[in-house]
Image (cartoon, helix red, strand yellow):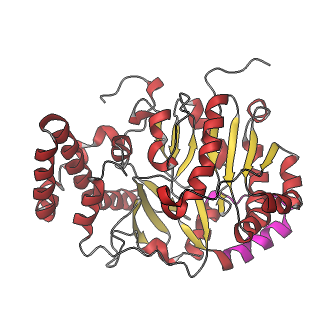
Amino acid sequence: MTRDSSMPNGIHIAIVVFGPVYTALLTQITLANLAALVREIPDDLRELSRVRIMTTATDACTIEQARTLKLLREHIDVEVLDRAKLHGHDTHGDYGPMVVSQRLLVVEAMRADAALFFIGPDLILNKGAFAALVSRFREGYRLVIGPGPRINRRTAVAELKNRIAESPDGAFALAPREHAALLFRHWHCVNSQYLIESPSSYWWKAYVCYRPRPEELLFRSFQGPTFAAWPARIDENFNGFIDHQLAAVCCESWRQIYIIPDSDECLALDLTEDDRRDMLPPADLLAPFLLSQLFDHAAIKDMYLRCGVRACRVHSGESDSQSVAAWQREFDRVVDPLVVIALGERSVGRHAGPMVAKIYRTLCLWSTHTLLFVLGPIASRMVHKWKVSAPLNSGPISQ
């Protein structure tokens, strides 16, 4: 069989898991979801692909005995690797073991010229999601980012176990609207802390949301979550969060980053413990705190900042197009001016130096609401070129 050189040399579905709670979630729910999703990968590409589960020796024994693993292996090669690294807290905080272990999977995919789908042990995706991710590679994209809101684990797992029990073969993937309905039915309170309309949102937001109706959500991301990536080169020294550093080894330009525009295409749901509360200080003033975050070059790279002007609509039903457009304009009016200001700061830093950039940041933070008023009507036009989703192979667009 001749390999299509415009596509990756297979897909490595990367999973890092350790500990009894997450191993149970993986074997009871996530592997059953994957058993349905991997069938969406075209046969020629699936023959080159594999699921790679990085775990501990103890958890590997549990995984190997799972009925869902046997089901998954009927459709794709699966490797259970007892090489998980349980350190890295000093560099990456609570996520240290995941980041360090994930790094091994990323580098090995680079060496093989394979793409990666990143699946957490507590993550489920909708029917059609893997087919959509493969299609993005065919179109020339190298990185795919989409929404990954949280749902209450206890009640959602009980419902999903019933779905699995009803399935003829034990695999499941919900239709997109049904999948989105699961989010709104089991809405986790942590999600509310990322809403722009929330009076007590977190001061640091990897993403921001707007919920104009109970079953409508607009989602903008500045730091992932990364669903899929195809590295363009080998970087043996890669070491960091995939949502921060991976774009640099995958993409020449922001145009190779695809932001999922609609949950009908792809939506990941995070099965989160019901009583989880993130210990982050609240944002007393939403706009200045979000702007301060966008000024952080280390956490938010230029390419991600430009892509932050694109929104994903998450919905379980239909709304008239005029209402959707109006909600989008409302969301734009709050976030687009902040992106314009943040991009301006980066330009000032490059051309006038760090001291002038520092003065710029201070003045902008002092006058954020005035700038929002001034830039609100025009900011969306200023960032319009970054709202267009068109990969490099589709022709020239102003960079």
166 relative to 104, above or below: below
Image quarter where the C terminus lies is top left
Image quarter where the N terminus lies is top right
Residue 373 visible in the current orientation? yes
Kindly give the residue lying farthest to the bottom in the view shown: 275
Q: Is residue 198 left or right of residue 257?
A: left
265 or 22: nearer the eye?
A: 22
Magenta highlight on residue 218: no
- Which residue is at 61% across, 23% downward? 6
105 or 323: nearer the eye?
A: 105
112 or 210: nearer the eye?
A: 112
- Which residue is at 68% across, 28% downward? 9
Estimate the x, y position of residue 148 in percent, counting from the top left. Answer: 54, 60
Q: Which residues are magenta?
A: 156-176
Estimate the x, y position of residue 158 in percent, counting from the top left. Answer: 74, 77
42 relative to 168, above or below: above
Quadrant in the rendering for residue 219: bottom left
6 relative to 183, above or below: above
387 or 355: nearer the eye?
A: 355
Residue 265 visible in the current orientation? no
Estimate the x, y position of residue 24 in percent, counting from the top left. Answer: 76, 68
Magenta highlight on residue 168: yes
154 relative to 286, above or below: below
Quadrant in the rendering for residue 209: bottom left
Q: Is residue 92 left or right of residue 111?
A: left
Q: Is residue 116 left or right of residue 256?
A: right
- Which residue is at 18% across, 49% downward? 378
The mark total stands at 0
Kindly give the residue lying farthest to the top in the view shown: 2
Estimate the x, y position of residue 107 in percent, counting from the top left. Answer: 61, 37
